Image (spheres, rainbow, N blue to C red):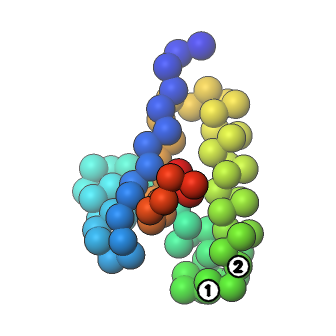
Amino acid sequence: MSEQRLILAIGLPGAGKSTWLAERGVRPLSSDAMRILLSDDEDNQTIHMQVFEALRYLVVKRLQLGISATYVDATNLTRMHR
C-alpha cells in the first residue's frame, strides 16, 4: 500500500482555512459542508456530535480505500479534536 496522508487545517473560525485550501485546489472534508448536508444550515451548532461522527466515518473510509491524501477543514483546535 502506498503512503497515505491525513492533513488537518487548524485555526479559529474565519481564519482563512477554507480559502487557503480552495486556493490550492483542495477539496477537503469540511465540518461546515457536513452541517449543510445534515441540517441545511452551515451555522447549526446543535448537531456538533453528528457532524464530527460523520467526518470521522468519512476519514476512516477514505483511509480504508487507500486514498493518498485526505484534507479535513475544521477548527481542530485541541489535540483531542485532532
Element under disc 1: loop
Q: In this view, does 80 lie to the left or right of 50?
A: left
Using the rendered view, name the quadrant where residue 14 is placed: bottom left
Of the 4 image quadrants, the one containing the N terminus is: top right
Q: Where is residue 80 in the image (x, y as percent from the top left)?
A: 57, 55
Q: Is residue 37 visible?
A: no
Q: Is residue 64 visible?
A: yes
Q: Which of 67 and 55 is in front in this view?
A: 55
Residue type, label 1: Asn
> What residue sits right under mark 1 in the picture?
44
Q: How crowded is mark 1: few (under 14 residues within 10 Å), some or many (20 or more)?
A: some
Residue type, label 2: Ile
Q: Which of 40 and 79 is in front in this view?
A: 79
Q: In this view, does 78 lie to the left or right of 39?
A: left
| Residue at 38% across, 75% down | 13
Q: How crowded is mark 2: few (under 14 residues within 10 Å), some or many (20 or more)?
A: some
Element under disc 2: loop
Residue 47 - label: 2
1 and 2 marks in contact (CB < 8 Å): yes
| Residue at 70% across, 31% down | 64
Q: Position of residue 60 (x, y in %)?
A: 68, 41
| Residue at 44% across, 62% down | 77
